[in-house]
């Protein structure tokens, strides 16, 4: 792996892309019509959020390097494989984090910069360096930091946090435990070797599967609220019910079959689930407001 690829891998590009997608949807949902004048601030916002998220991911690599060396799925990462030195990673993380924060302060707004910085601290330090190592409820307590991207997108455009933005946050927050615990079941032995107290390690797979079912049911309920509150319409509702029904079916099948492969497939489906759910929100929003493309002007939803 070349040096550039190693630095790029530090940013966890797959995770950052999902963050940017949900942030972008938050931006567009905050406007009644397809944007025109806001494109510059949207691009600055996405850049600042991407750099900050990449910086947090690099700090995560640094904090987890000992565990990564033990775990099969992470042994190839730049630090445990010896491709990069610790000091290089910390400098890189610092540059990305500072640059991302400055871009948000000077080209977007202070509120978005502050919320992004708090999210960075929450993920890179509170979750990675503390919660992850002391409690099997780590992903529940620390999941709030990873649920903020749509709120960051919303505040990028409007400069304020609204109930609709918090509803988007709630969806990702409730989605996080079943998403991550499905992976934790599949990688249980890895977490056990690394002495990380993930729920399947401390309480067993069956107990974790029950928690996955509970949170997926809760997720199904929470995803109905955009329709119930008038934030979205029947197109989103249909998508949420179909996607959520499939997610629920997979979690019950996981409990019935005890299949590690199904746990992996559930984890992969959960990623597509979130992307498609937010895509339905976006399509429904622009059909409701009748400007799928160009009258190309916008006004923030207040």
Image (cartoon, grey):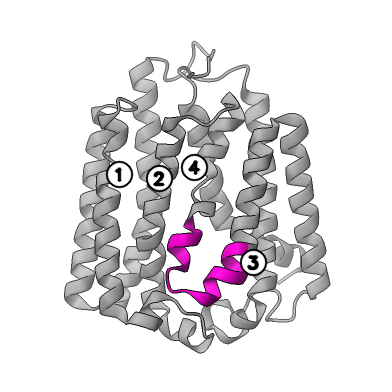
Q: Is residue 166 above or below residue 245?
A: above
Residue under numbered circle 4: 22
Mark 4 touching mark 3, by CB under 8 A? Answer: no
Label located before the other in sequence (3 or 1):
3
Label located before the other in sequence (4 or 3):
4
Residue under numbered circle 1: 222
Q: Secondary structure at mark 4?
A: helix
Mark 2 touching mark 3, by CB under 8 A? Answer: no
Identified at 78% across, 49% down, the residue is 98
- Kindly indicate the quadrant of the structure image that contains residue 259: bottom left
Closer to the camera: disc 3 or disc 1? 1
Residue 241 colored in magenta in the image: no
| Crowd band around label 4 with a 10 angstrom C-alpha radius: few (<14), some (14–19), many (20+) | many
Residue under numbered circle 3: 60
Which percent across, then down, holds residue 189? 43, 86
Quadrant containing the N terminus in the rendered view: bottom right
Which percent across, then down, holds residue 278? 40, 40
Judged left or right of residue 77, residue 139 is: left
Distance from disc 4 to disc 2, alpha carbons, whole Å, reads: 13 Å
Label located before the other in sequence (4 or 2):
4
Identified at 34% across, 81% down, the residue is 203
Q: Which mark is residue 170?
A: 2
Judged left or right of residue 193, residue 267 is: left
Judged left or right of residue 199, residue 126 is: right
Q: Secondary structure at mark 3?
A: helix
Identified at 43% across, 31% down, the residue is 163
């Amino acid at each position: 792996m070349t040096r550039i690829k190693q630095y790029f891998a530090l940013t966890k590009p797959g995770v950052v892309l999902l963050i940017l997608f949900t942030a972008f949807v938050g931006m567009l949902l905050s406007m009644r019509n397809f944007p025109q004048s806001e494109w510059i601030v949207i691009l600055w916002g996405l850049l600042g959020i991407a750099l900050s998220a990449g910086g947090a991911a690099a700090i995560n690599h640094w904090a987890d390097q000992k565990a990564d060396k033990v775990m099969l799925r992470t042994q190839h990462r730049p630090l445990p494989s010896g491709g990069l030195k610790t000091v290089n990673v910390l400098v890189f993380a610092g540059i990305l984090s500072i640059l991302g924060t400055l871009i948000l302060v000077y080209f977007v707004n202070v509120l978005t910069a502050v919320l992004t910085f708090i999210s960075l601290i929450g993920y890179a330090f509170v979750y990675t360096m503390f919660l992850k190592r002391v409690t099997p409820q780590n992903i529940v307590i620390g999941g709030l930091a990873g649920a903020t991207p749509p709120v960051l997108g919303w505040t990028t455009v409007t400069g304020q946090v609204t109930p609709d933005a918090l509803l988007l946050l709630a969806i990702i927050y409730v989605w996080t435990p079943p998403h991550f615990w499905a992976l934790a079941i599949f990688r249980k032995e890895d977490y056990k070797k690394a002495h990380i107290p993930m729920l399947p390690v401390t309480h067993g797979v069956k107990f974790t599967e029950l928690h996955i079912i509970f949170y997926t049911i809760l997720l199904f309920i929470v995803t109905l609220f955009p329709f119930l509150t008038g934030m979205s319409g029947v197109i989103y509702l249909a998508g949420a019910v179909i996607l959520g029904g499939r997610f629920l079916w997979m979690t019950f099948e996981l409990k019935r079959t005890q299949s590690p492969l199904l746990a992996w497939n559930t984890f992969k489906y959960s990623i597509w689930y979130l992307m498609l759910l937010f895509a339905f929100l976006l399509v429904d929003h622009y059909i409701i407001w009748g400007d799928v493309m160009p009258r190309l002007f916008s006004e923030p939803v207040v």
